[in-house]
Amino acid sequence: MTFESEWARKSTEANQRFVDKAVAIAREVEVVLGHDSMTCPRQPVLRARDALADRLFGILAAARDASRTFYDVDQVAVAVVSDETGDSWIDPVADAVGTLAAAMARAATVLTGMLGSDLSDTTTGPWAGGVLDDVRNAAGEVIRRAEGPAAGRDDGVVPSGGTESP
């Protein structure tokens, strides 16, 4: 087995571990920001903010854990997949997870300014609703990309340095 093929195996395994955890977190985010949760009368904004912050830390921990999958390698790059010939590309699910993490960080920050108020997703106006919609959309995109070709999507390969548009 060559170094490139061994590295390809390790990068694929590390990314799959990350994707599995990230998809579970994305599903949790959809539940947290679902209509039932946000219309609950007991501090929906505070609960959403705390839940998003917790899920953001969960994504960071999943990336760290996946990158340290192998005892004989200090770290394996997460979000970059390699093949046996040494070519690399951005994993589309990991790329979507990065967008989700950024949206959750932004939403948690915006919602911090709303603490102590009795505002909910339906009464905060378009600015907070839009921020929460960004998180909902990003979580949905993670799940769609994880479903891959079975869901009618492309193979998800993005050339190194490129980005995939939805």
Image: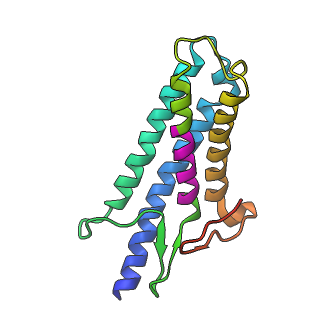
Magenta portion: prevailing SS class: helix
- At a point 38% along the width and 77% down the height, the residue shown is 7
**Whole-percent x, y for residue 112 in the image:** 51, 24
- At a point 50% along the width and 30% down the height, the residue shown is 51
Question: Quadrant where the N terminus lies?
Answer: bottom left
Residue 103 colored magenta?
yes
Please give the count of numbered marks on the rendered protein: 0
Q: Is residue 143 above or below residue 82?
A: above
- At a point 59% along the width and 55% down the height, the residue shown is 96
Q: Is residue 28 above or below residue 6?
A: above
Say which quarter of the image contains residue 106: top right
- In the rendered structure, which segment of residues is drawn in magenta? 94-105
Side of 54 where 38 appears, left or right: right
**Whole-percent x, y for residue 144 in the image:** 67, 54
Q: Is residue 1 visible?
A: no
Question: Quadrant where the C terminus lies?
Answer: bottom right
Q: Is residue 148 visible?
A: yes
- At a point 51% along the width and 31% down the height, the residue shown is 109
Say which quarter of the image contains residue 117: top right
**Whole-percent x, y for residue 41 in the image:** 63, 11
Instruction: Give the residue at the far right of this rendering.
Output: 152
Q: Is residue 116 above or below residue 57?
A: above
Residue 95 colored magenta?
yes
Side of 118 where 126 appears, left or right: right
**Whole-percent x, y for residue 35 in the image:** 70, 26
